[in-house]
Image (tube, rainbow, N blue to C red):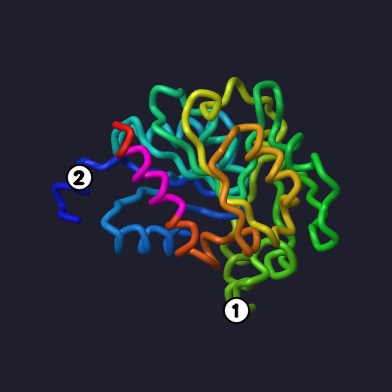
């Protein structure tokens, strides 16, 4: 694919989940570049849902719209809250997709938790941290132990208000969507993911990964993103 062809492709913007930052998409970004697709990671502050949507909008102003939005975990709610006219499609990677009037917590706790899922409580500042042991037991069990230690050390907390704020009408109601269903996810139960994917009528791909395939199965994630890009381009 030539540079000129790449320049005219649908912009791809990646939104990270809780306890992470844009660097969590590094392996996916490299994989997409190998296929001629440039992607940009939006830096979300994780201070409130509104703040995160604003931060995503700023990134969209830089890269152009309409864009293909890709969200992991909590960021499914963020990409769904962007104005539909800025969105060409949405890819949810083991992500939460609340409908109008629902909160992230509503869909996160819709199904009984996995036995290895951590208890999550806000601290005195209203921030939720992921217990260090949870990176290896629930969040990214397929990653090597040394990576678990780094993930825990660099984690960024999420404000409790981010997951308890009801969303408006989500963009996936009117835009095409894709869903990466992580079969061995210990954070978001498989049944909850299937419910959300079916509800948004997403093109779903069920794969044998943990909750963090952007870290542990980047090629599989990039494959689904490429599928979405190609379908959007074909439909122009």
Label 1 belongs to which residue?
A: 146
Image quarter hosting the N terminus:
bottom left
SS assignment at label 2: helix
* Residue marked by disc 2: 7
**Badge 2: residue crowd in 10 Å (few <14, some 14–19, many ≥20):** few
Residue at left offset 46%, top offset 52%: 224
Q: Is residue 92 left or right of residue 64?
A: right
- Which of the two residues, 197 or 235, is positioned nearer the viewer here? 235
Residue placed at 30% from the left, 53% from the top?
Answer: 37
- Of the two numbered discs 1 and 2 on the same chain, state the one appearing first in sequence: 2
Identity of the residue drawn at 82% across and 57% down: 114
Q: Is residue 85 magenta?
A: no
Name the one closer to the observer, 59 or 159: 59
Q: Which residues are magenta?
A: 224-233
Give how far across and how far down residue 56 sits, in percent: 44, 36
- Tell me the number on the disc at residue 169: none
In the rendered image, residue 231 lying in the magenta stretch gets the answer: yes
Q: Residue furthest front?
A: 234
Q: Are marks 1 and 2 in contact (CB under 8 Å)?
A: no
Check the picture and name the quadrant holding the C terminus.
top left
| Circle 1: element type | helix
Q: Position of residue 227 (x, y in %)?
A: 41, 49
> Looking at the image, is mark 1 or mark 2 nearer the viewer?
2
User: Where is residue 60 drawn, in percent x and y?
Assistant: 36, 34
The relative height of residue 56 versus residue 122 in the rendered view (above or below) is: above
């Amino acid at each position: 694919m030539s540079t000129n062809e790449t320049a005219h492709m649908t912009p791809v913007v990646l939104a990270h989940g809780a306890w992470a930052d844009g660097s969590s998409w590094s392996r996916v970004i490299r994989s997409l570049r190998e296929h001629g697709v440039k992607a940009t990671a939006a830096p979300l502050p994780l201070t409130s849902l509104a703040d995160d949507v604003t931060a995503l909008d700023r990134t969209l102003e830089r890269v152009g719209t309409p864009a293909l939005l890709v969200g992991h975990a909590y960021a499914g709610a963020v990409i769904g809250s962007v104005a539909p006219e800025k969105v060409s499609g949405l890819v949810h990677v083991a992500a939460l997709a609340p409908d109008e009037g629902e909160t992230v917590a509503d869909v996160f706790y819709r199904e009984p938790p996995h036995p290895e899922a951590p208890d999550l409580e806000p601290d005195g500042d209203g921030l939720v941290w992921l217990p260090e042991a949870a990176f290896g037991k629930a969040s990214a069990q397929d990653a090597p132990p040394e990576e678990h230690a780094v993930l825990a050390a660099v984690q960024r907390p999420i404000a409790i208000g981010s997951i308890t704020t009801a969303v408006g009408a989500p963009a996936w109601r009117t835009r095409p969507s894709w869903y990466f269903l992580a079969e061995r996810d210990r954070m978001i139960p498989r049944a909850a993911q299937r419910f959300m994917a079916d509800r948004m009528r997403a093109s779903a791909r069920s794969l044998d990964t943990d909750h963090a395939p952007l870290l542990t199965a980047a090629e599989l994630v990039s494959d689904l993103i490429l599928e979405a890009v190609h379908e959007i381009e074909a439909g122009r």
